[in-house]
Image (cartoon, rainbow, N blue to C red):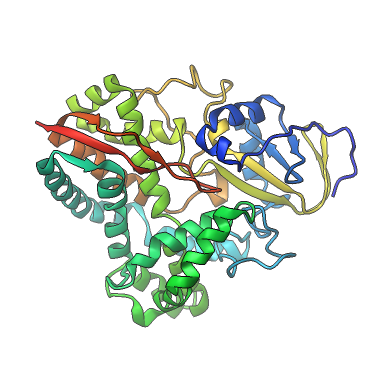
Amino acid sequence: MSDVTDRPSLDLDPFSRETMADPIPVDRAIREAGDMVWLPRYKLWATGRDAVIREIFDDWERFSSSFGTGLTNVVRDEPWRKPSVILEADPPGHTAHRKVLQRVLSPKVMRQLREDFFAQAEEMVAGLVAQRRFDAAHDLAFAFPFKVLPDSVGMRKDGREHLMPYATLNFNAMGPRNDLYEAARKVVEEMGTFDYVVRQMARDNLEPGGFGEEIFKAADAGEITADSAGMLVRTFISAGIDTTAYGIGLTIRALLQHTEQWEMLAADPSLANAAFEETLRWTPSSPIIGRTTASAFDFHGVRLGKEEKVLTFLAAANRDPDKWEDPDRFDITRRAAGHLAFGWGIHACVGQMVARLEAAAVLTALARQVSAIRLTGEPVQIFNNWLRGYESIPVEVTPK
């Protein structure tokens, strides 16, 4: 750890209930504190500036992912699960695994999935619109990704009740070992979720024709090991479903808060992609990602010690006025390309095209079928160490 005593410091808690309930002031404080700021409560560095975060993400040799992308140093301290071969890895090991996933999730594959995703979204939304009242978070934002992505991977229908508890633990474990982590761990232990995950990672438990089968074909070809193939399948179990679900829910919530933006989308459903991208910029569901210094070095006026954690506050950077004009304004006509919600560089989210496709399908179907949408109750936020979103958004809709 660095022995510098005059490091810029900010005494706040990004993982408190108060911050989770209203994170924007803390995001702003971290961004405005400087290029790099020390958070003494957790003994780590933080930055909320767009340019600095891009520099960190581009420098994977000094800012490593292989020590873990959360608070835990997975090399030095015992992690709650075996580290990911892609999320918590650096080249050269990371390269082969990412290459396989990029092929499995290629734009060509996404084009093949598009018709099916859009058809399923139209059907799901039609059923909900017929009810007039439903929960836009539980019945739509969650229900759609939790169906189409496991289907696409080739996960069996039985056991899917384990997906959300496991993902909840996965993201709570990225933060401090607090009551949220302990509660999430208790749920998966009582449900036997760890056993389910091990079974679902196995080739024999994957349905033919899905992403999982394609990953194991890469193992057959000698590109990766069979163990690594199972670990890549685990990536779909632990990440990628709930982040997308929360992202869709946050988009619906933002449109409810800005009725003029909903009216634009309802009038022109082709704005669905733009609405999702602006939401990812304005309020990303995954607002933080971590790196660890591989050595001691000077960076933006401070001395970083070896194996010090550095948290990049993506949500803060996505409202950086040096990058975005009028950054606190939600505007679905904005050119939001270039936000950091999916990361940047060699570790940018490899599944981002799937998330975009799912969101576009849901939001397009909603805009095509609904003329007006309003809240019928207070939305319920989630409390998760590493994610933001809503578990309930009760709405009433008027069909077109």
Q: Residue at x 66, y 39 (%)?
A: 13
Depicted 330 relative to depicted 178: above or below: above
Residue 336 place in picture, x, y as percent:
42, 29
Residue 287 placement, left or right of 124: right
Depicted 32 relative to depicted 224: above or below: above
Residue 121 placement, left or right of 194: left
Give the total of numbered labels: 0
Residue farthest along the top direction in this orientation? 326
Quarter of image, res 212: bottom left
Depicted 24 relative to depicted 157: above or below: above
Depicted 361 relative to depicted 91: above or below: above
| Residue 315 visible | yes
Quarter of image, res 220: bottom left
Of the pair 322 and 20, the residue shown nearer to us: 20
Q: Residue at x 29, y 73 (%)?
A: 158
Residue 168 place in picture, x, y as percent:
47, 57
Q: Residue at x 86, y 45 (%)?
A: 2
Quadrant the C terminus occupies? top left
Residue 276 place in picture, x, y as percent:
35, 36
Quarter of image, res 217: bottom left
| Residue 218 visible | no
Q: Residue at x 34, y 25 (%)?
A: 257
Residue 67 placement, left or right of 118: right
Of the pair 192 and 260, the residue shown nearer to us: 192
Residue 213 place in picture, x, y as percent:
35, 73
